Image (cartoon, rainbow, N blue to C red):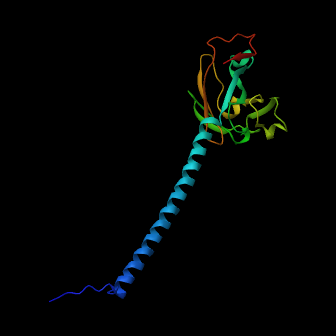
Amino acid sequence: MFETDNDHDRGQVGIGTLIVFIAMVLVAAIAAGVLINTAGMLQTQAEATGEESTDQVSDRLEIVSASGNVSDASDNNNITELNFVMAMAAGSDPIDLNKTTAQFIGSEGEETFTTDNGSGVEIKNVQGVDGAPDEAVLTETSDRVEVIVSLNEVYSTLEEGDQLSVIFTTDAGATTEMEIRVPTTITDEDSSVKL
């Protein structure tokens, strides 16, 4: 009838409740570890992707000038060699021309090749590049190299009025594109023409 308050009563937790509590703590710890690991992995991937994207935009070549060497009159004044003076774009990391590819697209089809010395391509140091031509690495924006492409070996000679798309791609994936248009009239006195 009369209830007495006893401040000394204690609640008891069964072994089952204790096991469930420990299991919940373990599950939370594992989930937190997975989340932290995933976040770290995503951050690393995002940094790598950001660096690659930056390289694809900034690590590119700049074509300072382009000209063509004209064959003699017996060959109908065709362009037999293309000369490109190249520099690295502002803000670019060093560019190794031996790891750069060139793609020619024109009326004779499409051809892709590397711009290292040999097989129709010659690299000449013009300004500031140290080392032999086969070590042609642009390191400063003031560096200049001349890339000479023999069309007979890598593509086809160009005639008066021909057009050719040239795309240079560095090893970072950055591209530089130029549209070449051969003059509609080349005289016998012309040994080289600006393109």
Residue 147 at what x, y percent from top left?
74, 30
**Extreme residue in the bottom direction:** 1
Q: Residue at x 78, y 33 (%)?
A: 123
| Viewer-side residue, 12 vs 101 | 12
Q: Residue at x 63, y 18 (%)?
A: 182
Residue 3 at what x, y percent from top left?
20, 87
Looking at the image, how many numbered discs can be counted on the residues? 0
| Viewer-side residue, 147 vs 28 | 28
| Viewer-side residue, 46 vs 33 | 33
Q: Residue at x 47, y 66 (%)?
A: 32
Q: Write down the quadrant of residue 23 in the picture.
A: bottom left
Q: Is residue 57 left or right of residue 132?
A: left
Residue 116, above or below 4: above
**Extreme residue in the left direction:** 1
Q: Residue at x 81, y 34 (%)?
A: 129
Residue 82, above or below 3: above
Task: Please identify the quadrant where the C terminus is shown.
Answer: top right
| Viewer-side residue, 56 vs 10 | 10
Q: Write down the quadrant of residue 98 in the picture.
A: top right
Q: Is residue 155 left or right of residue 41?
A: right
Residue 12 at what x, y percent from top left?
34, 86
Residue 128 at what x, y percent from top left?
82, 31
Q: Is residue 60 left or right of residue 22?
A: right
Residue 83, above or below 27: above
Task: Please identify the quadrant where the N terminus is shown.
Answer: bottom left
Q: Is residue 34 left or right of residue 97?
A: left
